[in-house]
Amino acid sequence: MRLGLTGIRKTAGRATAPRRTQAGAAQGGRARPASAGFAFGFLCRFGLAAVAASAGLAGCDSGAPAVAADVGASAQHAPANPPAVAIAAQALKVVAAREAAPNGGQTRAQVYESVRKMTALGKQLFFDPSLSGSGKLACASCHSPDHGFAPANALSVQLGGNDMHRTGMRAAPTLKYLQAVPAFAEHYHESDDEGDESVDAGPTGGLTWDGRVDRGGDQARIPLLSSFEMGSSPAKVSAAIKAAPYAADFRAAFGEHILDSDDATFKAVLQALETFEQTPELFYPYSSKYDAYLAGKAQLTQAELHGLQLFNDEKKGNCASCHISQRSRDGAPPQFSDFGLIAIGVPRNRALAVNRDPRFYDLGACGPERTDLKGRAEFCGIFRTPTLRNVALKKSFFHNGIYHSLEEVLHFYAERDTNPGKFYPVVKGKVQKFDDLPKRYWANLNTEPPFDRKPGDQPAFDEAEIKDIVAFLNTLTDGYKAGH
Ligand code: HEC
Ligand code: HEC
């Protein structure tokens, strides 16, 4: 067996994934604490997840959507997830206690109102290009609501900066289902409800491809200030808000004098964006055909079912060992990621400007974007496993956006090791395998199926099987309506 963090993680993942659901079914599921596994949340800090969720505004836990669904009309999923209701009840008790307490902070009605205001503002901010230095770039420019909050175009990396010609080194990810991402941990132990607590699943969680921040507000700061993205500053953001049609609403939500201070205004902007990103019906509706299938409300076609089998099969795709496809033990819907940071040796994208410098490498968790794990060799080349929910709406794949169709991605998984010359440059007849990771870090690379082969072996799956896996991935798109 292979040593290193990634090896530990994968063994753990495979061993626990299939067993989870059975155990969960046997026990009928259990509620978990409302704060568990939540990476960014202002309500959650106050233990008020379910208040917001039951108002259809925001939620904290991966189990929360069922609560949201109660109100949010996608009722087909509501009964499927009783633990979430338990969470709601628990959190409401917390609030009831606060309401009863003499100095108990905000009442439920006040919290509801403040979340509603902040969500509405966050939405305005998200779509407002005037926050950027160029006046042309909004969050929504790179995170399009019609494309699962991923880019609408097929560029590997998006254009930004003051001249709108600058680029970064990474593909813009979807913003959906981030509520389920746990805070970054070097050694992640699953909660009692999710799996085997004693297993070290390795580095897991955090937002962005390298897991470098834990909260939505801290994340939002990055594109707002980045010179190759929105290129703004607290002073510019503050000036934009003073001139915006929603300036009065902003003061109503954050206080009459909020706009007197640029820093306070900037912090409020981050908080509003973070709150908006927790709107369940927009960001985690669990309304895909696959969700309907899990709830017994839809049938998969032959091709989709076969694709699901291949996706789960440990000797074929083995995809589910990282992109979890089954409900967790407590009945929460699958997120299609275990949020582990893993090195799979994605080829260098030579179309990126940063990569014109042959000495430059985007090494994920060990830098250069992330700085706290610099020099820690075991973190080099690892990137956070993305959710595959809504992946069919994306037009660029992997952290560097090198591929532009799911078929290309699937070929990479099937043939990375059997036919590496197809993916990596060939120099003087020799394949430059793993050309985006210096050799000293190769021990970090994953070698579990489908990456357990050598040149000349059969690919892990064939053309017809790729078609079926892609058909299955298409069932993960939200907004499914029976009969379509
Ligand atoms: C120029 C394109 C661009 C703009 C504009 C942009 N983003 Fe992003 N976003 C990205 C990229 C690229 C990443 C991945 C960054 C990384 O991994 O270092 C990202 C990552 C994120 C993530 C983390 C997703 C995950 O999977 O962990 C969140 C949340 C996010 N952006 C929110 C926002 C918000 C809020 C705004 C507006 C304030 C915004 N973005 C503006 C390109 C953009
Ligand atoms: C060992 C864990 C692991 C396994 C097994 C695995 N993946 Fe992934 N997957 C990842 C990681 C990590 C990434 C991001 C890699 C990167 O960008 O460097 C990823 C990225 C992807 C993406 C791109 C998503 C996006 O938003 O860019 C798709 C699609 C995907 N995987 C599908 C699959 C399928 C289908 C299978 C099975 C054939 C599979 N994966 C097996 C870990 C895994």
Image: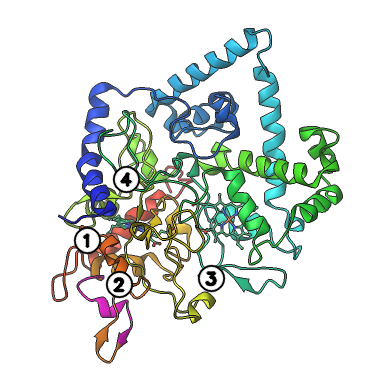
Q: Which mark is residue 324?
A: 4
Task: Give the x, y percent position of residue 125.
Answer: 71, 48
Q: Note whether 95 is above or below 456 in the view shown.
A: above
Inter-mark Cα distance, 3 to 2 = 29 Å
Q: Quadrant of ligand 2?
A: bottom left
Q: Note whether 278 is above or below 143 in the view shown.
A: above
Mark 3 residue type: Leu
Q: Residue tagged by mark 1?
A: 447
Task: Give the x, y percent position of residue 2.
Answer: 18, 56
Residue 286 in view (yes/no): no
Inter-mark Cα distance, 4 to 1 = 18 Å
Quarter of the figure that contains the N terminus: bottom left
Going from the N terminus, do you reach mark 4 or mark 3 first? Answer: 3
Q: Name the residue located 48 percent from the left edge and 58 percent from the top edge.
A: 393
Q: Residue tagged by mark 2?
A: 439
Going from the N terminus, do you reach mark 1 or mark 2 first? Answer: 2
* Quarter-of-image position of residue 185: top left
Magenta segment boundaries in residue numbering: 416-426
Foreground tag (4 vs 1) = 1
Q: Note whether 390 is above or below 251 in the view shown.
A: below
Q: Residue tagged by mark 3?
A: 155
Inter-mark Cα distance, 1 to 2 = 15 Å
Going from the N terminus, do you reach mark 2 or mark 4 first? Answer: 4
Q: Note whether 463 is above or below 449 in the view shown.
A: below
Q: Does the CB distance between marks 3 and 2 fall below 8 Å?
A: no
Inter-mark Cα distance, 4 to 3 = 28 Å
Q: How many marks?
A: 4
